[in-house]
Amino acid sequence: MDNQNSLAVVRRREIVKAGYIVEYLTPEEIERMVEVAKTKKKNRDRDTLFIRFLFITGARVSEAIGVEVRDVKKEGGVCYVFIRQGKGNKKRKTGIPEAFYNEIMAYAYKKGLPPDKKLFPFNRQRGWQIIKGVSKKAGIDKNVYPHLLRHSDAIYRLKKTGNPKALQHHLGHSTITMTMRYLATLTEEEAVKIEAEVEF
C-alpha cells in the first residue's frame, strides 16, 4: 500500500472514531474520587493531586508521569504545564487555572521537590491502580481508568468554552477529527434531552 492510500485509510478511521460517543465522569464524580484519596493513609497528597492533574490538564497518564516540577510554569500571568513527552514525542503547553498552579507549587514545596523532580514518580501501571482503586471506593458504577479523566476534562471544557479548536490544542490532537468525538457526545445528549421533553 503506497503512502497516499495509507493516509486515506488512516483518515477514514479517524472519521469513524469522530462519530463515537465517549463515556466520561462528571465533576461531581471526580470530586468523590478526590475525597476518597484524601482519606488514604499513604500518599494521600500525591494521589489527590494526581487525580486532579489528570482531570484539569486532560493529560494522558504517560504524559502526567513525565511532568517535572519545572514544567509547571507561570509566565505573563498565564499558568500552564509544559508537556515534554506527548504522544509522538510532541511537546505542548496546557493551560491551567492559577489556583491549581498554586496547589501544585504548594505540594512541591511541602514535599521538598527540586525543579527536576517528577511530580508523580511512578509508572503507568501504578497510575492505573491508583485511579481504579479510588474510583471503586468512591462507588462509581463505571469502568474508570486514567484516560477516562482525559475524556471528562474534554467534555467539561467543551461545555464551558464551545471551542473545539482550542480543545484540540489542549489535548494535543494532531487533527480536529479526533476532538470532534466530544462534540458528537454532547450533541447526542442534547438531542436526547430535547426529545424526552416532547409530550404526547
Image (cartoon, grey):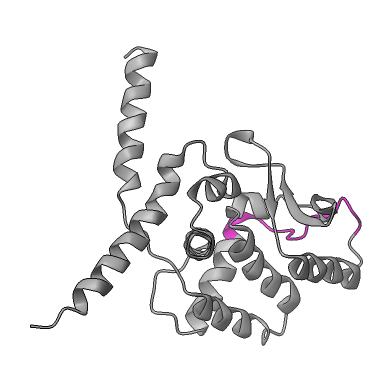
Q: Is residue 54 left or right of residue 136?
A: right
Q: Residue at x 52, y 81 (%)?
A: 28
Vertical placement of residue 105 versus 69, above or below: below
Q: Is residue 104 magenta?
A: no
Residue 42 coordinates in the image, percent (x, y): 73, 79
Residue 6 coordinates in the image, percent (x, y): 35, 21
Query: In terms of secondary structure, what is the magenta stretch mainly?
Result: loop
Q: Is residue 186 left or right of residue 46?
A: left
Vertical placement of residue 116 versus 141, above or below: above
Q: Nearer the viewer, residue 162 or 135?
A: 162
Q: How many marks?
A: 0
Furthest residue in direction left, as rendered: 200
Q: Nearer the viewer, residue 100 or 45?
A: 100
Furthest residue in direction top, as rendered: 2
Quarter occupied by residue 182: bottom left
- Give the extent of the magenta segment: 114-125
Q: Nearer the viewer, residue 42 or 149?
A: 149
Q: Nearer the viewer, residue 178 or 135?
A: 178
Residue 147 coordinates in the image, percent (x, y): 50, 58
Which image quarter is the C terminus in? Answer: bottom left
Residue 151 coordinates in the image, percent (x, y): 47, 59
Furthest residue in direction bottom, as rendered: 39
Q: Residue at x 33, y 45 (%)?
A: 17
Quarter occupied by residue 56: bottom right
Q: Is residue 44 left or right of residue 108?
A: left
Q: Is residue 115 magenta?
A: yes
Which image quarter is the N terminus in? Answer: top left
Q: Residue at x 53, y 60 (%)?
A: 161
Q: Residue at x 16, y 78 (%)?
A: 198
